[in-house]
Image: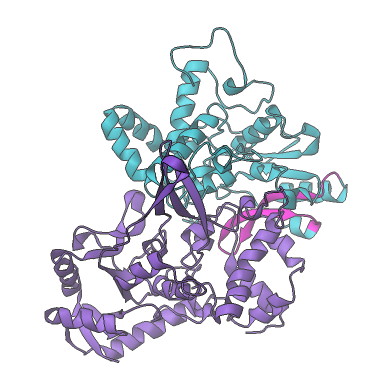
Amino acid sequence: MTELRELARKLLSDGQVKVVIGYEEGPRGVRPLFATDGAAADRLIFDERCVQNLATYLDRRRVHVARLGKPAIVAKPCDVKAVAGLLRETQLKREDVVIIGVRCGGVLADPKSLQRLGPDTMADRCRTCETREPGLVDYLVGPMPEAVRGQSGRDAKIAELDAMTPEERWSFWQKELSRCTRCQACRQVCPLCYCDRCMADKTEPQWIESSPHPRGILAWHLIRAIHLAGRCVDCGECERACPVSIPLGLITRKVAQVVAQRFQHHPTDDPSVPSPIGTWRSDDPQEFIL
Amino acid sequence: MDAMTISRADLLGLAEDLLGSGIRVVGPAKASRGMVEYRAVAAASELALEGPELPARSLKEFYLPPTEPLFAWKSLAGGKVELMEARMAPPPTVVIGARPCDAAGVEVLDKVMGWDYRDEPYFARREATTIVSIACAGIDSSCFCTSVGLGPDATRGSDLLLVPIEGGYRAEVLTEKGARLVSGHQGRFRPDSGAAQAQEFKQKARAKVAAHAPPDARPLRSWLETHFDHPLWAEVALRCHGCGACAAVCPTCHCFDIVDEPEGVTTGVRRRNWDTCQTARFTVHASGHNPRSDQNSRIRQRVMHKFMIYPKRFNEILCTGCGRCVRACPGGMDLLEVISRVSALAGGAG
């Protein structure tokens, strides 16, 4: 913690950055902090409750954050993959952000539970994550954590869904998606949903209906899944943000599995690796259009 | 005020009686992934009364659904258009186990829904519905009903308030509708015997919420009226994603969008859908100009509307202190903190 705070203080006092986007202890749990001076930098923390992917705040359309000036960002390995995604897709220039990478042994599924991090309390996505130390960073802080691993309930659920008949799968998703009100929280927190005007918001022509009826809900979630194919970094923010607990991670994870199988692509913190959706190769598999 | 008592078994029996006579029963029920939601139940055993969680969404959707058709159209030969109004025949409904903050939310909404125009679909549902609330023990540190003139035992919007006592509830009859429900099911109720216990429950619950709740939010109105450009707005909005999860779960946010959706070449439906001032799209003009061009101005709008604009017009805070916006916010925005900070800026008013 001292290491992180001292680094943040130094970056701010040297004038290298104007704001350090990190985590603080909020009144009701850990929350994002925008430290613009040394006193605020002393509130920075990092531990297994820091679930948020702060790369979302680098979206230049967030003018209220951009106005603060050049940022440094505290980033876990999955968060760094999101920064790499923004660089890969020319949404950000490398020199416009300072990345403070934190070594990460996984975060809690329920950060308010006050549980200790273990195979059963860890967020499902972290149970299958191999990366402890992010690349691409300017600074790296924190001790190397133990490699705690767990069984992924999500992968088991995906296998269960895959084994279902299409009718059974349809009824599972109809039930889960029936709670969706199209509030778009899943889109807004996603670091890679950065379109100026999302096609879901367009009215002339209206590509997809904006109503949260079964047709509109399904259209939204299908479009989101396809647009994130090979781009999703599995940070879990969409599922965490959903106010009605729709298991969106099942969708993003399943699509990631398909992309891995068809295109041998895995989310990476190397921005020079092209994403399958942004490239075409003559030997791309043709039997299914992704 | 009339009061009776009802045992837990009789309350579930009452729900069964209602279901048996074809009345729709809505109440908190377990949904997938351990979540609780208000929904129409098929059997009383589905009801998850008294929590411990708050249902993920408020009762609002039973009056103002996330989407509803207003009318359908059909283009006819000769440039004529036929309009078919959506048939409004809401089923007779009894809500059992509403939280007092959610019941109050509906009464707060009545003001705007019946203001310059009487919203027919909304009031048709209002009239068809009886609300039986259960006094709340206080959920967690996000609750602040006591700061907005309510409380875990608030009676506003409820037709019958059930206060937990040993073995069941003390039923306080609050309205004509509540009285009709009791008199129609006399066999389920017993004479009042729990006044002291009910009082003790209420006091404990109030103390639990008041222990961490911010100051009274009602006096904030005058400060808000004169501090549109205060630096506070730029600071508190930083972590906001503009996602609108807060509005989706809010019992009182009521803004809607009207859309025309073609369903075929010559036919279509006009619908109204929930909307929220937290998105950039909400205020963008046809010219491309957006008077609320950043998230600071959108957060300010949310706070202003709830604690200044609505009170000014209707003498009513547009917030019931349920805390759902705080629990749902992926960015850690905290309305309790905003109320406390504005109170401090206003010189400790409240």
Which quarter of the picture shows residue B342? Answer: bottom right
Q: Is residue B1 magenta?
A: no
Q: Nearer the viewer, residue B2 or B256?
A: B256
Where residue A3 sits in the image (x, y, percent)? Answer: 73, 47
Q: Which of B155 and A147 is in front in this view?
A: B155
Residue at horizontal 34 percent and vertical 53 percent from the top? B34
Question: Does the rendering let one see residue A142?
Answer: no
Q: Which of B346 and B286 is in front in this view?
A: B286
Which residues lie in the magenta part?
A16-38
Where residue B130 sits in the image (x, y, percent)? Answer: 29, 74
Question: Does the rendering let one see residue B335?
Answer: yes
Instruction: Tell me which secondary structure the magenta stretch mostly adopts.
Output: strand
> In which quadrant is the N terminus of chain B drawn?
bottom left
B247 displayed left or right of A54: left
* Vertical side of B282 occupied by B157: above or below: below
Residue at horizontal 35 percent and vertical 58 percent from the top? B37
Palette colour of chain A:
cyan
